[in-house]
Amino acid sequence: MTDASAPAELLRVANLHAFYGESHILHGIDFVVNRGEVVTLLGRNGAGRTTTLRAILGLTGTREGSILINGRETIGMATHAIAHLGVGYCPEERGIFASLSAEENLLLPPAVASGGMSVDEIYAMFPNLYERRASPGMRLSGGEQQMLAIARILRTGAKLLLLDEISEGLAPVIVQTLSRVIRTLKERGYTIVIVEQNFRFVAPLADRHYVVEHGRIVEAVTMAELDEKMHKLHVLLGI
Amino acid sequence: MFDLLGITPQALYSQLLIGLINGSFYAVLSLGLAVIFGLLNIINFSHGAQYMMGAFIAWLGLTQFGNWIGSPGMQINYWLALLLAPLLVGALGVVIERTMLARLYKLDHLYGLLLTFGIALIIEGLFRYAYGVSGQQYEIPEVFQGAIDLGFMYLPKYRAWVIVASLTVCLGTWFVIERTKLGSYLRAGTENPRLVQAFGVNVPLMITLTYGFGVGLAAFAGVLAAPIFTVSPLMGADLIIVVFAVVVIGGMGSILGSIVTGLGLGLIEGLTKVFYSEASAVVIFVIMVIVLLLRPAGLFGRER
């Protein structure tokens, strides 16, 4: 799926500032995500990780700085136009629509690029969703809702996935399933940015970790450096 | 049985028919309000004025249009008006939404209500200035003149058409919203517009078109009403208060609720006229009070 002639860099965030009304949340975020990489944004609650994902999609208030997606500057673009650059978003609160059935939720997001998974492939990947397809969105369990929230952005052809706290509040067996899903998606060439609290869940999956604190990136750790920087990470994350 | 109750069957049937006609108007108007409230979170107080504009466009097209273009024989007939009035009023709605309402979404409901109330007063004032309050007559289209003999009563053809047309429009709207892809965007947008936009749907455009469609429905009802009620600048102001009561009873934002409640309350109003006509003007408001006390979200509404 990765195009050899395309540049390696899929997402470049530079000096990103974001505001909610009067409050200044992000103070110059810089990071880079290459095609086919899994990258995490780690940090404590309120550090600005979720805001960073939301700012990439233009869901915050004012935002300043630069966000290049596939080499295109998106800082002045409308949210729906950014999505059509091939971005899929799975929000922290999962955002399953209560008035839609599970299958309507799955079919809701419009295609933003070619090459999305077919509904059959998705049901093969998430058999539970097939069984629950006629249920109203709000009747699904937390794990089913989370899988649905991921599944529905795989259908759209988005290649850059922004996943916010997908393991939060789920049973260990479901977290293992999600871990397998992320691995499969990586093998298929998806580029994934994960905001995560559960370091043990993402540590084996990610190529790189960025630590966010007070609205800035304070540390970047590659997979190779993980052992030597483990102590520092523990201090930064308070784990 | 009719003797026991002291009424005639003719009186009962004719009042039920009037109730059904009024109910049809309540249904189409409250449906438009419900669609607008669902997505925009705005209580569109100018709905009555937009309904009145629909009726006026029909009347102007039939009686004045020829003079304006200098050939008195030219007319915009009823059928053309039925198409043209919703388009014109919808287009005006699009302009109102883009230039004014779009600035209010981050504020409380109250601001939208005040703005649309102001717009209603301006529109009604302008029409009153131009055409006075006495009201104009609109002739029933030729195909619908006369009545059908149902055996137990005569059913005026035009009234039958109003009921059929309103119900068709209501059910069509319900079908689009509940059973199509476009409708799923609308329902999802009602719950979480930002997320729907993050999926790549042009939500601001969808909101603009929804407002245009909602007020277009009001204009459609206005054209339907032109041959039945007097076309006057205040015809909407009189009706809209009852329609708001219908919306409150059915539940804000509920599509099916507004249709069923509209028709049901029209019939109840008609029945009240037969059995205790003194109460007919207030019965809907009495029901509204009872519903608000027992089910504040309305009969079909969800707490939000």
Image (cartoon, rainbow, N blue to C red):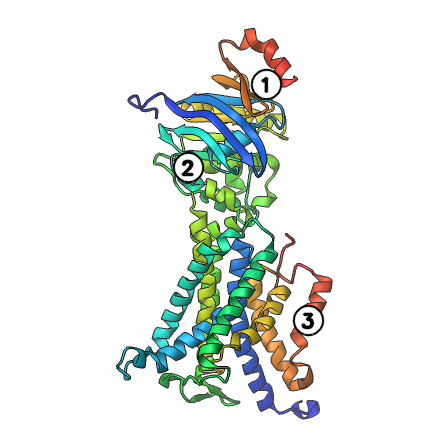
In the picture, the quarter occupied by the C terminus of chain A is: top right
Q: Which residue is mark 3?
A: B287
Indicate whether A60 appears above or below B44: above
Foreground residue among B150 and B193: B193
| Image x and y of residue B209, in percent | 43, 56
Q: Residue at horizontal 45%, vertical 24%?
A: A14
Q: Residue at horizontal 55%, vertical 40%?
A: A95
* Residue A76 circle label: 2
State whether discs 3 and 1 lie on one chain: no
- Residues under numbered marks 2 and 3 in contact, where contact means CB atoms less than 8 Å apart: no
| Image x and y of residue A12, in percent | 42, 24
Foreground residue among B4 and B165: B165
- Residues under numbered marks 3 and 1 in contact, where contact means CB atoms less than 8 Å apart: no
**Quarter of the figure with residue A156:** top left
Please tell me how crowded label 2 is: few (under 14), some (14-19), or many (20+) other residues with Cα within 10 Å: few
- Residues under numbered marks 2 and 1 in contact, where contact means CB atoms less than 8 Å apart: no
Q: Which residue is mark 1?
A: A200
In the picture, the quarter occupied by the N terminus of chain A is: top left
Indicate the amino acid at tag 3.
Ile
State whether discs 2 and 3 lie on one chain: no
| Image x and y of residue A18, in percent | 52, 32
Could you give the CA–CA distance between mark 2 and mark 3, rounded to whole angstroms? 51 Å
Residue that extends furthest to the right in the rendered view of this protein: B293
Indicate the amino acid at tag 2.
Gly
